[in-house]
Amino acid sequence: MLEKVHGYIKSYNLIEKGDRILIAVSGGADSVCLLHILSDLYRDSDVSLYAVHVHHGIRDEEADRDEAFVKSLCDRLKITFTSYHFDVRAIAKKEGLSEEEAGRKVRYETFLSASIKNRCNKVAIAHNKNDNAETILFNLFRGTGIKGLTGIDPKLTMKTDTGNITIIRPILFVTRKEIEDYLSQHGLHYQVDSTNMQNIYTRNKIRHRILDYVVNEINKNAIEHITNAANHLKEADNFIEKYTKDRYTAIVKEYENFFEYDVKDFSFEDIVIQKGIVRKILGSLAGRLKDIEAKHVDEVLALGKKEVGRQIHLPYGIIAVKTYDTIKIYLTNSQKKCKDITFKPVDIKIPGKTYLEAYKLYFETEIKNYKKNEPIPKNSCMKWFDYDKIENTLKLRTRKAGDYLQINSQGGRKKLKEYFIDSKIPKEERDQILLLVDGSHVVWIIGHGNRISEKYKIKDQTKKILSIKLNFDDINNCKGEE
């Protein structure tokens, strides 16, 4: 067993030179096995070991017994021991959680606190192959995507309400029977948690009513088959995740307070990639994927075919809204902030650079002579205007009453408000659209089609060109004209 665990640790780089490892020890068979194995493997190394025990305040004398047992065990192994006490029932009631959820929450917050106290960079947890199979089935029954069926990771960084911790699981590949056999062969004692035998918790029901039945009545190798299937799904998921990340970068626009994607561009992607992109957005907004289920992703996908203005409410206060051409996703408490961006008019420097911090971009201008038949740029980030047609100081601002656009070479005009309505630009977005104006005459509507006024377009008679280049942090924001 020692050799197998050491090989597993090396294959996943779970423990490295100089690591300070905090071991979570409940006193049960799994954690006692883990504690003994790591103690034997790293006794005379530069890896430091520490133990932490969480007393949930639920099992009274039995819990006190477990705590005393773990302390005695750590004393014999000469491993620093720390214990933390909680009233999980009270916490569950106060925060509206099940006792199972509250217990998990306090455990991981404790792991972080104990890690900081002992300057540990990793936390070792005694999850095993049976736990992995139970987790896979639990996620399947609850509703999940492929990720939830890939099982428990041997190593990951976990986000808690108070910070991030690196979790390692050195005996994840070992079955519960192998653990019990190892303890028996070495004459090692452990404690039995009576609540593990009661079918009052979801995982216990899966363990005793489902997995035990499947192993005894259907296939004795069921746990092995379940975890092997999860490994195959993990390989596929890794490929999908990499491709999804590339397509996410190409399709999704990230703003300070919301995410947005074009429905038409999005529709060209395979359904698997669509779901991956939506999960990535929801995970970014929520800060986690817990409670983000497959049905939530499907609801966002269905929104693309709904009428303008339809919205759905998702976990963590996330709202997804259908606009004319896009899906916009944001947190409820950021909606007002998103709408209330203020912007004061700015004179554009000619020639020179004009920076707009609020919009995270700048404009670069120059004046040059026009050569007849010179090709005009077909790029939304580069515009040419007839410099001699400009009557006032050009300004960058948002819309005002009286703004208009010249829509044809005969001088026909259209009010900007009418243009926005005809272009199906959502009402709530119109006050945030950036404009280049000559008095009340709109020279360039920046974004949303990048329409420029007919008056300022380059003609054969043009002598001087005002060239304006729009620069983003990411040059990929520039697209050709539609």
Image: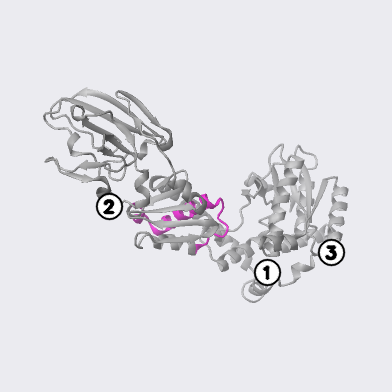
For the magenta stretch, what is the residue range? 265-294
Q: Quadrant of the N terminus?
A: bottom right
Residue at the image position 26 percent from the left and 45 percent from the top? 416
As rendered, which of 360 and 254 lies closer to the eye?
A: 360
Q: Amino acid at mark 3?
A: Asp
Counting from the top left corner in percent of width and height, residue 51 is at 79, 48
Q: Quadrant of residue 271?
A: bottom left
Residue 161 rendering spot, x and y as whole percentages = 64, 50
Q: Position of residue 197 (x, y in %)?
A: 75, 70
Provide the residue designation for mark 1: 207
In terms of secondary structure, where does tag 2 sit? helix
Residue type of the residue flagged with mark 1: Arg
Q: Which residue is mark 2?
A: 421
Counting other residues with Cα less than 10 Å from the Cα at mark 1, is it few (<14), some (14-19), or many (20 or more)? many
Return the residue found at the far front. 401
Name the foreground residue: 134 vs 165: 165
Residue that numbered label 3 is attached to: 60
Residue 267 within the magenta-colored segment of the rendering: yes
